[in-house]
Amino acid sequence: MSVFTARSRARTRVFAMLLAASVVGIGAAGAAGASAETLDLAPVDLGSAGTFAILSKSGVTDVYASSILGNVGSSPISGAAIHVTCDEVTGTIYSVDESGPACKVTDDTLLTGAVGDMGIAYTDAAGRTNPDFVNLGAGEIGGLTLTPGLYKWSTDVSLSNDVTLSGGVDDVFIFQISGDITMASAKNVTLEGGVQAKNVFWQTAGEVAIGTTAHFEGTILSHTLIAMKTGASINGRLLAQTAVTLQSNTVVEPAL
């Protein structure tokens, strides 16, 4: 299995500052410490959208039965477009109106804020600059082990085989994708070395399709549809600016 590594931007800046220190007499230790502190890749701030396992603008469809650990909501569309049932959700189902599942909580203000934060988070993720990897694998990342950093594609991204994200507990992965994300059936995204799902962000301008019985990790920030195929699971969040479709899936919201 190939392991892709790259010199981090923090190390690059440390080198530059140490070189400058040798010329102008700045203390090397202080320069390195300041550099490492300021150039670490920061997680995407999800705001109140981070309190949801599933959040969409156009509703949530469902083929019974799914298991959702976390909150579910949709706005501005009516709660009638939220088709998950109360027994499928360990958490709260939020609606903008009195329509929707019997157990729903009506809170238009909360949902408006969360959807707004979802948009801000999407813009943040999409706007990160100086990627560590550009168009890696020509969009095919199946079979790879990826290290922390900022990844950017001007294409679709496919996971035709298992993918491993390897790093430490505080390491951040941000994936910027101009097209769709398509994951093959029965494949897995695996976290290695202490990587936490809360620090993994997949921003995509296109649709997302997670294949039958596949397993995914991290927060998906989609500009359009997120479709979970039959039996697929995710340790993460489904944050869609159109709809989320479920087919007997497992969705577990990671801790912030």
Image: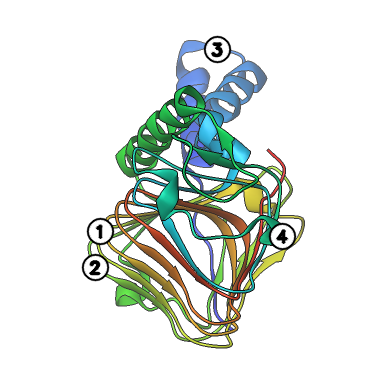
Give whichever of discs 4 and 3 has the lower sequence position: 3
In whole angstroms, how far apart are the C-alphas of marks 1 and 2? Answer: 6 Å
Q: Nearer the viewer, mark 3 or mark 1?
A: 1
State which quarter of the image contains the N terminus.
Answer: bottom right
Q: Is residue 231 left or right of residue 120?
A: right
Q: Disc 4 and disc 1: Cα gap in Å?
A: 36 Å
Q: Which of pointers 2 and 4 lies earlier in the amino acid sequence?
A: 4
Q: Nearer the viewer, residue 74 or 131?
A: 74
CB atoms at circles 3 and 2 under 8 Å apart?
Answer: no
Work out which residue is located at the far top of the displayed protein and give it.
Answer: 25
User: In the figure, 194 relative to 129: above or below?
Assistant: below
Of circles 3 and 2, which is in front? 2
Q: Residue at x 45, y 86 (%)?
A: 160
Res 130 → quadrant: top left
| Tag shown at residue 155 | 2
Which amino acid, by three-letter code, is at mark 1?
A: Ser
Asked whether residue 14 appears in the rendered view, the answer is no
Q: Which residue is mark 3?
A: 26
**Distance Cα–Cα, label 2 vs label 4:** 39 Å
Residue bearing mark 1: 178
Asked whether the viewer can see residue 109, the reply is: yes
Q: Which is nearer the N-term, disc 4 or disc 1? A: 4
Name the residue that disc number 4 marks: 87
